[in-house]
Image: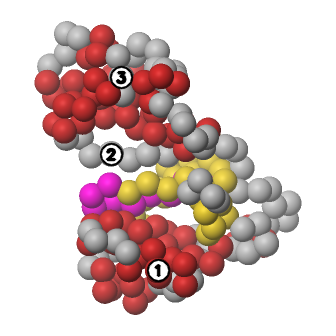
């Protein structure tokens, strides 16, 4: 399936989403992978993880980049090479930051001239079960079970996004990343 959705977050930041309907073979045939990515793909046991990985490369291709433009630093953070891809065609190119996420049948990338992080999670009961490990449970008081699951999922995504921005060894979600109280209906929070 082609690009599912694009969200303009601000003037410097866009998020791109791919709905993964293809099988691994179809995705694999549609992308060109460097040796390190091929090795990484072959080491993935889960077909869902393989499909998410390949769908990210489909998004890159859709935007004029390739797997060869994507590099990971020693801590695993992705980076786009400034001398390749479609941004070398821009009149005044600025360094581009990239953040990647995939969950179940969707993959996404966010590209910006600003540091940012993106995370995508499917709301599931398991998130609520592990919530005490990553959030203060007072944030879930007086909520229905579906709202608790939704809010715990949002908090996990916020913390995961901040983790991707900071990119430091030893960061603990409950000990180093804190969210202010918020209502789900507000559609935003501060952390």
Is 141 positioned to the left or the right of 155 in the image?
left
- Counting from the top left corner in percent of width and height, residue 160 is at 46, 39
In the rendered view of the protein, which quadrant contains the N terminus?
Answer: bottom left
Q: Is residue 2 visible?
A: no
Is residue 136 visible to the viewer in this orientation of the structure? Answer: yes
- The residue that disc 1 covers is 39
Which circle's residue, 1 or 3, is located before the other in the chain? 1
Left or right, residue 69 beside residue 155 = right
Q: Relative to residue 65, is residue 189 drawn left or right? A: left
User: Residue 177's spot in the image, x, y percent?
Assistant: 50, 25
Residue for badge 2? 121
Q: Are marks 1 and 3 in contact (CB under 8 Å)?
A: no
Using the numbered discs, state the Cα–Cα distance from disc 1 to disc 3 in whole angstroms: 36 Å
- Residue 110 picture location, percent across and down: 55, 53
Label 3, label 2: how far apart the Cα atoms are: 16 Å
- What label sits on residue 135 in the rendered view? 3
Magenta region includes residue 148: no
Q: Is residue 29 shown above or below 119?
A: below
Label 3, residues with CA under 10 Å away: few <14, some 14-19, many ≥20: many
- Give the residue at the far right of this rendering: 92
Q: Furthest residue to the bottom? A: 29
Badge 1: how crowded within 10 Å, few (<14), some, or many (20+)?
Answer: few
SS assignment at label 1:
helix
- Which of 118/173 is in front? 173
Label 1 close to label 2 by CB (< 8 Å): no
Point out residue 71 in the picture as x, y percentages from the top left corner: 63, 67
Task: Please report the bounds of the magenta region as a residue range.
Answer: 103-111
């Amino acid at each position: 399936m082609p690009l599912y959705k694009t969200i303009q977050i601000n003037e410097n930041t866009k998020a791109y989403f791919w709905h993964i309907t293809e099988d691994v073979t179809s995705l694999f045939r549609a992308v060109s992978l460097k040796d390190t990515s091929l090795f990484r793909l072959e080491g993935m046991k889960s077909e869902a993880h393989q499909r998410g990985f390949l769908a990210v490369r489909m998004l890159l291709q859709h935007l004029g980049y390739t797997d060869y433009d994507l590099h990971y630093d020693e801590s695993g953070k992705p980076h786009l090479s400034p001398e390749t891809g479609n941004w070398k065609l821009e009149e005044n190119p600025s360094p581009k930051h990239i953040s990647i996420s995939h969950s179940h049948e969707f993959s996404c990338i966010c590209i910006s001239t600003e540091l940012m992080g993106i995370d995508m999670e499917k709301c599931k009961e398991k998130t609520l079960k592990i919530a005490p490990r990553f959030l203060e449970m007072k944030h879930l008081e007086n909520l229905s079970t579906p709202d608790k699951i939704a809010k715990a999922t949002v908090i996990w995504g916020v913390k995961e996004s901040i983790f991707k921005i900071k990119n430091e060894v030893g960061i603990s979600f409950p000990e180093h990343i804190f969210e202010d109280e918020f209502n789900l209906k507000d559609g935003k929070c501060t952390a």
